[in-house]
Structures are given as structure tokens and as C-alpha cells.
Amino acid sequence: QVQLVESGGGSVQPGESLGLSCVVIGNFASFSTLGWYRQAPGKERELVASITGGHMARYADSVKGRFTISRDDTKKAIYLQMNSLKIEDTAVYYCNLDHRSPPVHELYWGQGTQVTVSS
């Protein structure tokens, strides 16, 4: 059984930075894609950033140049460094593990951590 546990959320002012961490409890394949999603009130959950086992990252257009995703498989951890935060970045952030080994496709989610950006 795989569990994901996020930490690092909080409240900041616009322009400030915040870092999120997520630890994976249990074993997972190194080729699994890890990612961060977010869900703002009244909106659907959306991809923020993801990183493959080969450390190829992709970002939502809204966070490109401001957010950086990274992973450390030795620590079973995924990170999201968020700089120049905007009010519209306010959301619950979820880490995600996407394991695909056809025909198996497994998705795991953390419990979420609140990020609030306000003046």
C-alpha cells in the first residue's frame, strides 16, 4: 500500500515563496511519474507540475517560471518550490503518484495541504 503525505503549506503574501514536500510511504517504481495538482474552491483539480522517472518536468502555463518541481527517489520525496506567489495560486495542493505498467494503471493521492496567498 502506498501513501503520500504532504507538508509545507501555509499562508503568505503575494510575491513571497513557499516550498511543499511530499513523502511516499511504501515502494514505488522509479519510472513512476510524480506530480503536484491543486484545487481552488469551486474549481476542478488541475495539474500544476509533474516529473517523470527520467526527471523530465512539465508545468502548467500559469506557473511556468515561478514554480520548480523536483524529486529525490532515495528519500522517496517530491518537492514543489513556489516563488512569486499570486493570489490565484491559493488552493489545496495535492501530490500524486502515477504508476503505469500496462495493463496496470494506479493513481495515488496525498491528503492535500492548503496554500493561501493573500494581502
Image: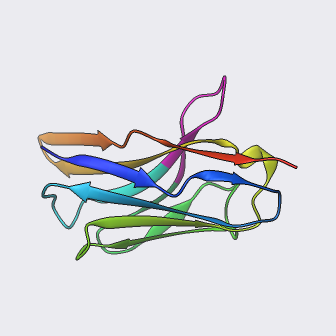
Classify residue 56 as left or right of residue 91.
left
Residue at the location (67% across, 59% down)?
63
**Which quarter of the picture shows residue 59?**
bottom right
Classify residue 19 as left or right of residue 50.
right
**Which quarter of the picture shows residue 24?**
bottom left
Residue at the location (39% across, 39% down)?
111
Q: Is residue 85 above or below residue 56?
A: above
Which percent across, then down, holds residue 6? 41, 52
The span shown in magenta is: 37-48
Q: Is residue 102 above or below residue 43?
A: below
Image quarter of the N terminus: top left
Which percent across, then down, holds residue 81? 57, 68
In the rendered structure, does residue 61 fall within the stretch colored magenta? no
Which percent across, then down, holds residue 20? 51, 60
Residue at the location (88% across, 49% down)?
119
Which percent across, then down, holds residue 11? 69, 51
Protein image colouring? rainbow
Residue at the location (47% across, 68% down)?
57
